Amino acid sequence: MTEKTSRWDVFEFSANGPADGNPYLDVTFGATFSLDNRQVPVPGFYDGDGVYKVRFCPDTEGDWRFVTTSGAKALAGLEGRLTVGPARSGVHGPVRVRNQFHFAHADGKPYLPFGTTCYAWTHQTVELQEQTLKTLADAPFNKIRMGVFPKDYIYNTNEPLYDVYEKRADGSHDMDKPNFECFRHFETQIGRLMEMGIEADIILFHPYDRWGYCTMTEEQDFRYLRYIVARIAAYRNVWWSLANEYDFLLDTKPMERWDRFFHVIEEGDPLRHPKSIHNGDVDKNYDHRKPWVDHVCIQNWDVKKTLDWRAAYGKPVINDEPEYEGNIPKEWGNIDGPELIHRYWLTLCRGGYIGHGETFLDANDELWWAKGGVLHGEAPARIAFLRKIFEEDAVNGLTPMLERGTTYKRVSAVQDGEVRYIYFGEHQPVEWGLGLPEKDGDWEIDLIDVWNMTITPIEKGPLPKVHPQRITGGSHITNQFAAAFGLRLPGKPNLAVRIRPRKTH
């Protein structure tokens, strides 16, 4: 019998095999999928009750064949056929790095990450998880950071919905016996996010633990990674984040083990989903120059360093934790909405990407950043406004602008093809001449109020005579207002300018 699926959807094959002993430790299972001369080995996994599964995400249309491999006789040599048709409407494939500093789906559609953080949302009550998904359906986020393991931290001390590993009689967890119900639930939620068009940035380890998950042995760590990769790598919306704040785990997981973790994931992931790792101490970034790292994941409040990170690592930069909009007593969780939006525009207009988080006090300790639920902040609406602006003209990615060899030092500016964005931030110029089109053409220039969410057309026109403003750049000096024409601005903070060819209809 020939199975049918669509390109970039999940195909699953199940078989019955040994149930005695501990198959998680003792039984290997996988399959090799082939299309003409191409062969793709895919690891399988044990799902309890004698059931073994292998999941495959086909990236090419056509008639595939597969054959299983296993050390167990009952599971070896099973064969099947799979016809893969075109991708369903709206499905663009997994996200990958493109143009060095940016991302796109496998079919070439540009992808600009606008993520949020809900570390332990899949470990809350079913009702709260449903509320989280409902909130996400109307929110501006297309990526979510979420952990495999539950979290033990302030505002997050409840017991999880499921244990990740089975409990022994004494209440401790047996890290050699997965709780299959927990993993099934976790991957179900990943699948629901996938159908919503939201990337699931999976955090594989973290230090905030009272169950013993972060102190597994090296062998248990590797086995867990192979298992989770086998279970969920076929979901096209998966990203791999090796850790939240890996440097707080170096006492139990030395640096060489983190390096090996990257290789273990790569060995079991045919789709080569994006991989990175997240720091805790702002001065202890992982060396993202290593070839197995796909993009830079940063925790740092000083978003003006985005240009430095691009230069240092030569890869896409995502500042996933630039501090949170909220009102908790912790300094990292009580910036206001205008400040977070300011950091968004600063980051994007310096060629990077940035993530959202929200930490407003709640009587039930249901803070979005940890548990999901509902959003209370002012930032999400402005993020939606910002996302629409930047996605509207996205082509190759936002590249920091240069002015005669000099980078913008105070304001931030990027361009994507012929479209340019200049963000003035805390600066309040009333006249501006840098970065405007030098060649003749029919241009539209818009003034953007990033907080009030307004877009107002403005025109380039004569500037009054002023004393030249000198900008030092290397060994030369330029005059900002040497041109006879420029922009007249309102002279207030948090404004941006968009310049693009006028659209004709």
Image (spheres, grey):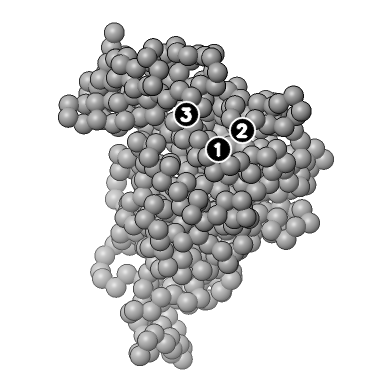
Vertical position of residue 344 compared to residue 430: above or below: above
Per the image, label 2 sits on a secondary structure element best described as strand
Residue 200 spot, x, y in % from top left: 50, 38
Viewport quadrant of the N terminus:
top left
Question: Mark 2 or mark 3: which comes first in sequence?
Answer: 2
Does the residue at mark 2 contact the one at mark 3 (Cβ under 8 Å)? no
Does the residue at mark 1 contact the one at mark 2 (Cβ under 8 Å)? yes
Identified at 51% across, 27% down, the residue is: 25
What label does residue 231 carry, if any?
3
Vertical position of residue 226 compared to residue 359: above or below: above
Residue 138 spot, x, y in % from top left: 57, 36
**Distance between mark 3 and mark 1 Cα atoms:** 16 Å
Identified at 37% across, 69% down, the residue is: 401
Q: Is residue 166 visible?
A: yes
Residue 140 location, quadrant: top right
Query: Nearer the observer, disc 3 or disc 1?
Result: 1
Per the image, label 3 sits on a secondary structure element best described as helix
Question: Mark 1 or mark 2: which comes first in sequence?
Answer: 2
What label does residue 319 carry, if any?
none
Circle 1 is placed at which residue position? 220
Circle 2 is placed at which residue position? 175
Identified at 25% across, 22% down, the residue is: 64
Q: Is residue 382 visible?
A: no
Other residues around mark 3 within 10 Å, as few (<14) / some (14–19) / many (≥20): many
Other residues around mark 1 within 10 Å, as few (<14) / some (14–19) / many (≥20): some
Is residue 44 left or right of 418 when viewed as pictured? Answer: right
Residue 108 spot, x, y in % from top left: 30, 43
**Distance between mark 1 and mark 2 Cα atoms:** 7 Å
Looking at the rendered structure, the kind of residue marked 1 is: Gln
